[in-house]
Image (cartoon, grey):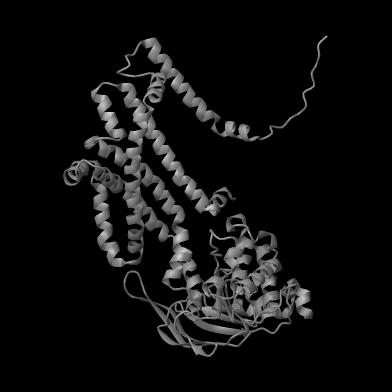
Amino acid sequence: MTVIEEIPYSPAVPTALGGWINRNGPVVGVFAAIFAGWEVAVRTLGIPEFILPSPSAIVIKIVLSWQLLLWNAFVTLQEILLGFGLSVVVAIPLAIAVVYSGIFERVAFPFMVSLQTIPKVALAPILVMWLGYGIMPKVMVAFLISFFPIVINSVIGMRSAEKEMIYLVQSMGAGELTTFIKIRLPKALPSIFGGLKVGMGQAVVGATVGEFIAAESGLGYLQLISQVRLDTPLLFAAVVVLSILGVLLFNIVGLVERLALPWSRVATQGE
Amino acid sequence: MVRDDKVGLPAKGSGAGVPIMLRNISKRYRAARGGEVQALSEINLSVGAGEFVSIVGPSGCGKSTLLMLIAGLIPPTTGVIEVDNRAVKGAVDNIAIVFQRDVLLDWRTVLGNVLLPVEIKKLDPSTHRQKARELLRSVGLAEFEEKYPAELSGGMRQRAAICRALVQDPGLLLMDEPFGALDALTREQMNLDLQRMWLRDRNTVLFITHSIEEAVLLSDRVVVMSSRPGRIADIVMNDLPRPRGAHTRSEAGFLEHVERIRRHFLALGVLSEI
């Protein structure tokens, strides 16, 4: 006798875990497949470790030399944050000046654009010559490379307020300062955050490249050393830590954005 | 007050209509490729305190320019403008503007948007907060106070924009095609809502529109403008009884006014029957 089990109709109940799996499952799956394939390939083909270490070898390396990695990550983090911070502090006032002053726009803007066309990496040796082997040249490369997207996006954002919006607050008797605080700045914030996200990614690149040129510590320096020593697993471990650092910093900017602009999520979800 | 109970609106604030006087106003713009554009020419118009005046005219007749001039946001090339018996120099106090686009600030809630003029003019926050709530309730937005504009429909957004204009009890309400972006049904409802508020407040309203019917339905007087340069072609007096409603649109007097204004546009070549 066959027992026919009655299965009640159960609509998929969205639990927290279920939701997470639905959203991120495919991504996790793809990554898992890539790493598994990599691991298998390295083992079966007998690829020497100094050419391509297996993912497990990299993980073991990270676990074994976590102190070394952490210390150097901390150095690089410092350079990134100082360079990025300097970018923000310089770029946003500069953007305000460009928006409000015609002369500034005509003089400073072409200068910034021409600066942008110079590969910043090419400036790094010069900066080392001027600023020595310490943290400063890396901070400056990170600054130079992350500065431009922040300025451009801030300028675009501050110009995005509609004419009627400006008329509206002027008709209420608002002066230029009130107009800036109540209209131009909040209107510009989504665009500014877009610039900050790009700039943060660039600052990571800048700091690492600065360390390639001349350094005594940092993840970029660690990579150079591992390369010379043919310690490929450590080289990969540094890359992993660097990308974790980059993703983390990018997401911190994203988190601040979500906290600062609760209305922005509504705007994108709407309709 | 009986009328207030009937229309379900909050008690009247302190704003009373103010008169407007335009004497020999003209406005020339410098065109983008050199030369000048005469936007307005020899405009003479006086609007009484508490009067509802509409301006109808083709696109590019300088209607919006006229509004900007009265608000003191741009200066006239020649002529004198007086609002509330004072010459206009710079932004005028005691007025509010409603544009075709609602220009609500995305980053503020509906209530925050309505309170914007209160903040900028540094009016008393607590009494005006109360008034803002009552205004929102009177246009059916009570439950949307804490929502962001992105969550509202076009009609709701424009209602919020009108509440923002009225919260400051403006003596003069300048409206630049406020319902031009709304669908026909919402627009009819908004016309009735506006009339209801005006009947209660009796502030002076200058209402710019493309719609002849809308102008006749709402106004005490309709100013007909010709284009390039904008001139006043005719002023139509309209004393149809109020409150006007859907029934008004079929009355002989209403149709007569509409017909008269339409004939102007035919004569001016704005409308063509071929």
Is B159 or A55 nearer to us in this picture? A55
Give the percent coordinates (x, y) of residue B13. 66, 79
Quarter holding the N terminus of chain A is: top right
Residue at x-position 42% and y-position 17%: A39
Give the percent coordinates (x, y) of residue A13. 69, 34
Along the horizontal axis of the image, is A59 left or right of B197?
left
Question: Residue A244 is drawn in which quadrant?
Answer: top left
Residue at x-position 49% and y-position 67%: A165
Residue A5 in sight from this viewpoint: yes
Is A40 or B270 nearer to us in this picture? A40
Question: Residue B198 is drawn in which quadrant?
Answer: bottom right
Question: Residue B208 is drawn in which quadrant?
Answer: bottom right
Give the percent coordinates (x, y) of residue A31. 47, 26
Along the horizontal axis of the image, is B55 left or right of B213?
left
- The single residue placed furthest to the right in the displayed view is A1
Residue A119 in sight from this viewpoint: no
Q: Considering only vertical position in the picture, is A188 above or below B62? A: above
Residue at x-position 75% and y-position 72%: B8
Along the horizontal axis of the image, is A74 left or right of B66?
left
Is B269 or A167 nearer to us in this picture? A167
Numbered circles on residues, count? 0
Residue at x-position 44% and y-position 58%: A188
Is A162 or A247 nearer to us in this picture? A247
